[in-house]
Amino acid sequence: MQILYRVIVFVLGVFGALEALFINIIYSSSTRFQNLVGLSPDASHGFIGLGLVLLGILGAILVLFRALIPGAVLLLIAGVGFFFIVHWWALLASPQMLLAAFLAFYHYWERQGKGTTRPREEQPRGGAVA
């Protein structure tokens, strides 16, 4: 069941990163076109956006191979950082990466809590059956 959970997080992360790549290409192309026709567009950060896309894909791959916390942190950085690059257009791609980061963090915390089911005081002593 854990592999299914990690695959879902991986798919969400990669899907969000691919959407971010598409949006970054369109946003950078539109600013280049505006510059070509003589308008003064906002600065386009195409290479930084591409770096964030690669960071999101790397984070999704790390989550798939059980490196939950580093992968979740990379997905979180990519999701939040994309807002600084394409502004409100990031609402089309960042939610998938942020959701994948949240699910990876949740999966990590859930796995950490499965060690004991009862507090230490309630555990039976010396082989007694509760």
Image: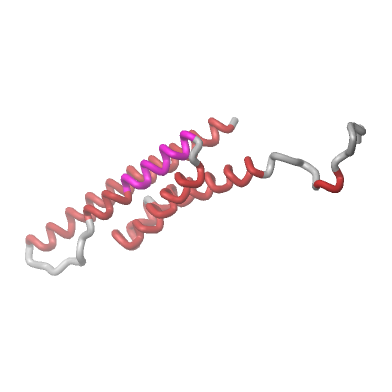
In-front residue for pair 46/95: 46
Q: Residue furthest left?
A: 37
Verify whether residue 3 appears in magenta: no
Number of marks present in the image shown: 0
Which residue is depicted at the point 38% across and 52% down? 78
Point out the residue furthest to the front here: 126
Q: Quadrant of residue 15?
A: top left
Q: Is residue 37 left or right of residue 63?
A: left
Location of residue 48 in the rendering, given as x and y in whole percent from the top left corner: 26, 55
The residue drawn where x is 22% and y is 49% is 25
Q: Position of residue 57 (x, y in %)?
A: 36, 42
Mainly helix, strand or loop, the magenta region?
helix
Q: Residue at x 42, y 49 (%)?
A: 75
**Magenta span of residues:** 53-65
Q: Is residue 129 above or below residue 38?
A: above
The residue located at (40%, 54%) in the rendering is 77
Q: Can residue 54 be found in the magenta stretch?
A: yes
| Residue 32 picture location, percent across and down | 13, 58
Task: Point out residue 113 in the picture as x, y percentages from the top left corner.
Answer: 68, 44
Report the quarter where the C terminus lies.
Answer: top right
